[in-house]
Image (spheres, rainbow, N blue to C red):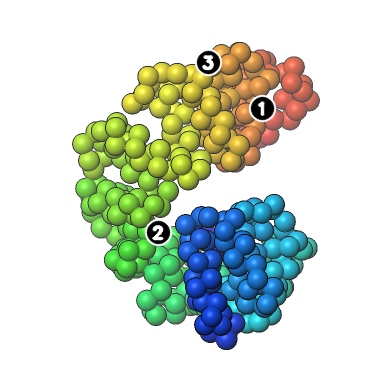
């Protein structure tokens, strides 16, 4: 668990003084909101632009998001940053959070952890639970301030006690892992359940995994799948992958490859790399699909481009053995090294074998010697 650096789409209503347009133009503003929510970005851009020009903080924040992501307009981080700044300076919490995130990841400006904290604190002081949570994780990770896991726990618990479902899920994770607090599986389960019962999909996934692994309770895959389904039906792609995998393996539900494919495809439609890698595996191994090495390679490559270590390792294996591509030890070693960089232990063993057999020495003999020594140093 780390501070989330992703720029989020925060669309909560900000202070009325910087949100509500004049009554005569309220209809146009509502039309702009509706266009944004249905993904009609060209219309949203056209309708929001006059409000942003006139200084409406919410419109400025939404336009910032459009420039940030290239929705209905050419992607322009600098323009996004300026719009977030205008929104933030008017006191809009969403604009303040997005401006803070620009400083965190360096979008349209230089990275500056101190300014990340400054703007988060402005939003937090105005009452934003999202900003308070991000400040807690900044303390947990030592971003822009001294690292203090116990202090982060106290901040997150305060939010959880207020009924904030994301904080309840985060608190469960801290109890499960013993981070900032002594490990307590029963407490973890309690907080996961509190979050899940508020229909928080992350909390539902955490509760499902707790039931699957027996964290704070007896293992119960039937209950696990019931909570997975609730999260998946809300569109949570990570839960969709887990649910598809449960159907593929018959864990907690009857084995059903049609349902497995359905839920994996749902996650793939959202660009989930674990789902893409799982599809690659199905085509490689003939698990629920007819063996098709070209399709396996296609899905693995999509996942590998997103740093999925399993896909990178399996592409190495395919290159090593000539499945779906020419047999090529150099290419195999390249994929194995990528997978190793992303923490895949199987790739370490696979690359060891290539080096020990001398099949990858032509890549870089000095590198091979260094790798072999490092792997055998005790």
The residue drawn where x is 39% and y is 52% is 235
The residue drawn where x is 29% and y is 60% is 216
Residue 309, image x, y percentages: 55, 37
Viewer-side residue, 21 vs 292: 21
Q: CA distance from mark 3 to mark 1?
A: 16 Å
Element on which disc 3 rests: loop
Q: Check disc 1: other Cα within 10 Å, few if <14, some if 14-19, many if 20+.
A: some
Q: Is residue 117 visible?
A: no
Residue 71, image x, y percentages: 61, 54
Q: Can you identify the residue that label 3 sits on?
A: 323
Q: Is residue 287 above or below residue 263?
A: above
Q: Earlier in the sequence, mark 2 or mark 1?
A: 2
Q: Which quadrant would residue 115 be assigned to in this image?
A: bottom right
Residue 247, image x, y percentages: 29, 37
Give the side of residue 142 with respect to residue 161, left or right: right
Viewer-side residue, 262 vs 311: 262
Q: CA distance from mark 3 to mark 2?
A: 37 Å
Mark linked to residue 334: 1
Viewer-side residue, 61 vs 319: 61
Q: Which quadrant would residue 119 be assigned to in this image?
A: bottom right
Mark linked to residue 202: 2
């Amino acid at each position: 668990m780390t501070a989330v650096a992703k720029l989020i789409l925060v669309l909560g209503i900000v202070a009325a003084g910087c949100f509500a347009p004049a009554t005569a133009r309220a209809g146009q503003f509502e039309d702009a909101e509706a266009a944004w929510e249905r993904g009609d970005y060209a219309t949203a851009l056209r309708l929001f632009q006059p409000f942003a020009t006139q200084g409406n903080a919410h419109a400025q924040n939404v336009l910032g998001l459009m420039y940030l992501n290239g929705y209905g307009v050419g992607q322009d981080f600098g323009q996004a940053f300026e719009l977030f700044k205008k929104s933030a300076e008017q006191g809009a919490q969403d604009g303040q959070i997005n401006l803070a995130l620009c400083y965190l990841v360096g979008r349209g400006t230089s990275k500056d952890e101190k300014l990340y904290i400054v703007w988060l604190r402005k939003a937090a002081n105005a009452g934003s639970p999202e900003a308070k949570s991000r400040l807690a994780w900044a303390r947990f990770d030592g971003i822009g301030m001294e690292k203090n896991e116990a202090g982060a726990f106290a901040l997150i618990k305060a939010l959880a006690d207020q009924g904030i479902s994301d904080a309840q899920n985060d608190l469960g994770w801290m109890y499960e892992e013993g981070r900032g607090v002594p490990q307590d599986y029963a407490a973890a389960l309690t907080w996961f359940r509190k979050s899940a019962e508020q229909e928080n999909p992350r909390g539902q996934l955490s509760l499902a995994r707790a039931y699957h692994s027996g964290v704070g309770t007896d293992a119960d895959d039937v209950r696990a799948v019931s909570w997975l389904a609730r999260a998946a039906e809300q569109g949570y792609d990570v839960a969709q992958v887990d649910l598809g995998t449960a159907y593929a393996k018959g864990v907690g539900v009857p084995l059903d490859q049609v349902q497995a494919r359905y839920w994996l495809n749902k996650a793939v439609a959202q660009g989930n790399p674990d789902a893409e890698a799982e599809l690659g595996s199905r085509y490689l191994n003939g698990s629920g699909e007819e063996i098709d090495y070209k399709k396996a390679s296609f899905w693995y490559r999509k996942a590998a481009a997103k740093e999925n270590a399993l896909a990178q390792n399996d592409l190495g294996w395919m290159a090593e053995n000539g499945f779906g591509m020419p047999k090529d030890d150099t290419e195999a070693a390249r994929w194995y090294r990528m997978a190793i960089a992303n923490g895949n232990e199987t790739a370490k063993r696979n690359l060891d074998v290539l080096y020990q057999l001398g099949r990858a020495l032509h890549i870089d003999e000095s590198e091979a010697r260094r790798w072999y020594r490092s792997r055998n140093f005790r």
